[in-house]
Amino acid sequence: MTPSPASATPYEVLGVPSTASTDDLRRAYRRLARQTHPDLGGTAQAFRDLQHAWQQVGTPEARSAYDRGSGSPSTSPSGSARSAGSSSPGWSPPPREPARTDSKPKARVHGHPGGANRERYLGLMREWVGRGVPLDDPYDERLVRSAPPEIRHVLADAMAEEATVAAVTELGIGFTIWSDVDAGAEGKLDHVVLGPSGLFAVQSSDWGSEVQVSRGELVGRGVPADEEPVRDLTRQARAVRRETRVSFTAQLIVVPDDDFAPALEKVGRRAGGTWVVRRSLLPQVLRHGPELGDRTSISDVFEVRARLQQAIRFV
């Protein structure tokens, strides 16, 4: 599985800068080991994250190996941002038209999945590296890992959107997906997916850490305090519904499998409502719906698709 660019670096887990001394690293580890240990009031996940971080940078040898691949950006003699030879672990944009390996009809795909966030990422990265400094490879692992978390999160979201479209594409010709849909003042809706089980407003996200449902919202260590994924998706879906005059069957927030303990969980009690779903379960949910109930008839699908094709605009 491709590592998430949004996941915390070992230095971030330890709460120290990448320039910290060996003694500072050791002190930070010992302090956090006491704080995160499950027997002392911590959580198993936090303790595991700490142990993994320590394995990466806890010894001079391990730290040197990590820094060679994920250290701070440097500047080449030509004045361009570069790394010490680290390559991107699958973070570059996918080909616009991947090579076909079979003749099975694919889902209809409209828009540019991940495109808006890719552009935003490149703009933020250029500004962070420094204006006028060429970027040889903006997806170089060492460069990305040294960027601020908010920049890495934008790239992770772009990749999440691309992964969702890849999954939907394999569902076949009975499905249609629109990506980067204009939601007016609410920004953009990541995806609109239409299939035999209904019409879905979909948000694809990757915060680089575990998330959970709490008090009607999705929360987690990597979710910024000012971010409200469930409410944001609801506002975006409402904006698209007003523009297209088509109601959604349900709203889905798709997250990486490792970041969500339940496979599928509903937020709130409203009919349809918002569901958080693991990425690997998304095809099943789109085929059959998140819960038992009436399915949209095939005649409805044709009518709704035509209406959406006329009304949807892209960012």
Image (cartoon, helix red, strand yellow):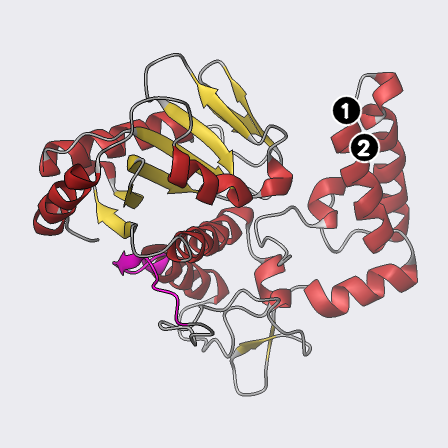
Is 17 left or right of 248, judged from the image as shown? right
104 within the magenta span? yes
Q: Identify the residue at horizontal 82%, vertical 54% (top origin).
A: 56
Residue type at the position of mark 2:
Phe
In the structure shown, which secondary structural element does the residue marked by tag 1 occupy? loop
Q: What range is drawn magenta here? A: 103-115
Report the residue that reaches farthest toward the bottom: 78
In the structure shown, which secondary structural element does the residue marked by tag 2 occupy? helix
Q: Identify the residue at horizontal 69%, vertical 77% (top origin).
A: 84
Nearest the eye: 186 or 81: 186
Q: Are marks 2 and 1 in contact (CB under 8 Å)?
A: yes
Type of secondary structure dominating the magenta stretch: loop
Q: Residues within 10 Å of mark 2 (few under 14, many from 20)?
A: some
Nearest the eye: 171 or 253: 171
Nearest the eye: 131 or 203: 203
Q: Which residue is mark 1?
A: 43
Q: Is residue 228 in view?
A: no
> Eyeballing the image, is 42 above or below 3?
above
Please state the horizontal and vertical placement of residue 63, each as a whole percent of the image: 83, 60
> Eyeballing the image, is 38 above or below 103?
above
> Eyeballing the image, is 98 above or below 35?
below
> Eyeballing the image, is 23 above or below 166?
above
Residue type at the position of mark 1:
Thr
Is 27 left or right of 264, judged from the image as shown? right
Please state the horizontal and vertical placement of residue 260, each as a whole percent of the image: 60, 33
Separation (CA) of disc 2 from disc 1? 6 Å
Please state the horizontal and vertical placement of residue 273, each as a whole percent of the image: 34, 21
Q: Which residue is mark 2?
A: 47
